[in-house]
């Protein structure tokens, strides 16, 4: 029998938080910092609005992880088709033309030019692109200005006041990414989310020296050169850190149906077979009480069969 523990992404105002926190498989809670918070506008000036939330989630009796976005590219504002411009969370430089990927790589648009934090597109996804959506630009010339966002800094300031110190940092690609977090919150216990080829290079160079590793498969799957190469990436991460966490694309069928898909069940078994013992459930499956509890119970059942 293989034991598996789970970190659950908890909606900030979920009325089922206590029940989830008490589930025997839950090893921690993740707060996704792109979630809207009452009184917080994403800037350090309103960081005190985060204090009650952090205090309440910290009192649930399991470790609380605050997931900072770091250098992850996200949509700012929204874009309604037809449109040819998308604003990003960071200013970037990249050799254009190139491709930008949306919706976990299922959609893409041709970037004709870049103007600071603006992507000027030849075409666009045929739907509304909402604030907070991630954007992947898989090009070796890509340079992103800065790492921590204003919202990241606000959360770190609030954590320094309230007390929680566990941080997940997206798109870790170099040692100074961890150093930037600890410069603001010296007590930070860090999970480094590996989500790009540069992140895999970081793993090869540093392993878990600067923090526990996480294989964040959503962006990592888009960022590897060919889809099947995500398998080698998962193996490299667990080899570098036997305590690594695996996340993203876990049991998405349960967000829409009461019965999981066969591929979802096999996926969890495959990850356990690779050696991962801590799994993190993402936003989609955790938005409803029934789906998150079903996911927790299913992971327990699969682990008992591995």
Image (cartoon, rainbow, N blue to C red):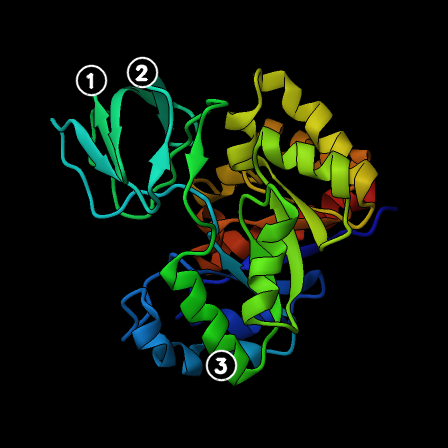
Question: Does residue 29 show up?
Answer: no
Q: Is residue 299 left or right of residue 92?
A: right
Residue at image coords 40%, 76%: 50
Going from N to C along the chain, the mark reached first, 3 or 2, is: 3
Image x and y of residue 243, in percent = 79, 50
**Around disc 1, counting alpha carbons within 10 Å, would you say few (fewer than 14), some (14 to 19), or many (20 or more)?**
some
Give the residue furthest to the right.
1
Of the pair 204 and 229, the residue shown nearer to us: 204
Residue indicated by mark 3 = 56
Question: Helix, strand, or loop for circle 2?
Answer: loop
Image x and y of residue 248, in percent = 55, 41
**Around disc 3, counting alpha carbons within 10 Å, would you say few (fewer than 14), some (14 to 19), or many (20 or more)?**
few
Mark pair 3, 2: CA separation? 47 Å
Mark pair 1, 2: CA separation? 9 Å
Mark pair 1, 3: CA separation? 46 Å
Q: Is residue 76 left or right of residue 210?
A: left
Question: Helix, strand, or loop for circle 1?
Answer: loop
Q: Please tell me the numbered disc located at residue 122.
A: 1
Discs 1/2, front: 2
Residue indicated by mark 2 = 97
Question: Helix, strand, or loop for circle 3?
Answer: helix
Of the pair 69 and 93, the residue shown nearer to us: 93
Residues under numbered marks 1 and 2 in contact, where contact means CB atoms less than 8 Å apart: yes
Of the pair 258 and 9, the residue shown nearer to us: 9
Quadrant housing the C terminus: top right
Residue at image coords 61%, 27%: 263
**Around disc 2, counting alpha carbons within 10 Å, would you say few (fewer than 14), some (14 to 19), or many (20 or more)?**
some
């Amino acid at each position: 029998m293989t034991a598996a523990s789970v970190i659950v992404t908890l909606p900030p105002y979920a009325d089922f938080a206590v029940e989830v926190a008490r589930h025997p498989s839950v090893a921690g809670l993740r707060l996704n910092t792109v979630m809207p918070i009452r009184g917080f506008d994403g800037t350090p000036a309103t960081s005190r609005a985060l204090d009650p939330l952090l205090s309440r989630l910290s009192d649930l009796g399991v470790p609380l992880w605050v997931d900072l976005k770091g250098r992850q590219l996200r949509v700012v504002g929204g874009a309604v088709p037809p449109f040819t411009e998308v604003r990003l969370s960071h200013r970037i430089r990249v050799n254009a033309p190139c491709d930008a990927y949306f919706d976990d790589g299922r959609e893409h648009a041709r970037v004709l030019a870049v103007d600071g934090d603006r992507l000027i597109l030849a075409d666009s996804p045929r739907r509304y692109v909402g604030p907070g959506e991630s954007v992947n630009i898989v090009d070796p010339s890509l340079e992103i200005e800065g790492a921590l966002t204003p919202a990241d800094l606000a959360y770190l300031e609030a954590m320094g006041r309230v007390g929680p110190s566990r941080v997940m940092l997206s798109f870790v690609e170099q040692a100074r990414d961890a150093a930037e977090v600890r410069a603001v919150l010296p007590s930070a216990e860090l999970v480094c989310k590996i989500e790009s080829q540069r992140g895999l290079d970081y793993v090869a160079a540093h392993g878990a020296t600067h923090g526990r590793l996480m294989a964040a498969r959503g962006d990592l799957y888009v960022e590897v050169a060919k889809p099947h190469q995500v398998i080698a990436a998962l193996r490299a991460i667990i080899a570098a850190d036997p305590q690594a966490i695996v996340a993203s694309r876990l049991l998405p069928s349960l967000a829409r149906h009461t019965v999981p898909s066969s591929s979802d069940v096999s996926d969890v078994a495959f990850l356990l077979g690779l050696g991962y013992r801590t799994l993190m459930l993402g936003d989609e499956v955790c938005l409803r009480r029934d789906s998150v509890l079903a996911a927790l119970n299913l992971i327990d059942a699969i682990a008992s069969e591995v």
